[in-house]
Amino acid sequence: MSAWRTFVRRVLGSIVVIGLSSVLVFPGGCSLLNEKREPVAGGGGGPSLAISDTEKVYGSPEPGEFLEYHIWLQNTGGETAIDVAAMIDDQWVFYPDIPPGEEMKEEVNGPFGLYIPSSASPGDVLDYTLTIKDGDDRQWQDTFSIEVQ
């Protein structure tokens, strides 16, 4: 966390700007309001992470089988996501920092290990939820599906 962001959060708390007709943007992701007390577009923005792609690297999606998947995350926000981690079923993997507009696959503890239940039938579609967190305790969730063969 930057020194500026720490200062704003600990000393200033919430910033409310009243009566400004121009847009001010502070470093460190501080959101500002315009004169109508609406959030200013691009006024900090922060990262926004979601699944951009998946790749099966091991196994076959058949009942009772174990699979390994790479999962790419894309940052569609306006700030670099730092210390990124993602979890499926209590399995955590870690990502490099993800700049705005970029996508990365996991680099530590990956790929994800997934198990197709033996009770699944061909044609079943299994949904998996990925929980994503960053170093500033922001959290996102996204899902992807695997069709059983």
Image: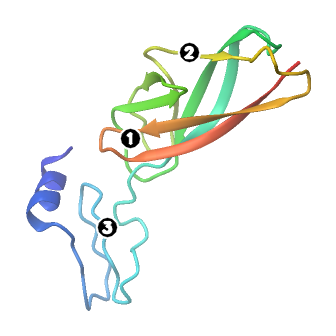
User: Does 129 appear above or below 57?
Assistant: below
Mark 2 vs mark 1: in front:
2
Q: As shown in the figure, which amino acid type bears the numbered disc 3?
A: Ser
Give the position of the N terminus as an image quadrant. Answer: top left
Q: Amino acid at mark 1?
A: Ala
Residue farthest to the right, as pictured: 123
Q: Report the quarter where the C terminus lies.
A: top right
Residue drawn where x is 55% and y is 26% of the image: 89
Q: Nearer the viewer, mark 3 or mark 2?
A: 2
Figure check: 52 above or below 36: above
Q: Which label sits on residue 111?
A: 2
The mark that comes first in sequence, 3 or 2, is 3
Front residue of this view, candidates 45 and 111: 111
- Find residue 65 and report its horizontal and vertical position in percent: 75, 9
Residue 123 location, quadrant: top right
**Distance (Cα) linking label 1 and label 3:** 17 Å
* Mark 1, other Cα within 10 Å: few <14 / some 14–19 / many ≥20: many
Helix, strand or loop at label 2? It is: loop
Residue 20, x across and y down, in percent: 27, 87
Q: Residue at x 43, y 26 (%)?
A: 95
* Cα separation between marks 3 and 2: 35 Å
Callout 2–callout 1 Cβ contact below 8 Å: no
Which residue has dot 1 on it? 81
Left or right of 12? Residue 142 is right
Q: Marks 2 and 1, how far apart in space? A: 20 Å
Q: Residue at label 3?
A: 31
Residue lying at 79% horizontally and 14% vertically, measured from the top left: 118
- Of pointers 1 and 3, the one earlier in the residue sequence: 3
| 81 with respect to 130 (left or right) | left
User: Please, what is the three-letter code of the amino acid marked with disc 2?
Assistant: Pro
Q: Residues within 10 Å of mark 2 (few under 14, many from 20)?
A: many
User: Disc 1 on helix, strand or loop?
Assistant: loop
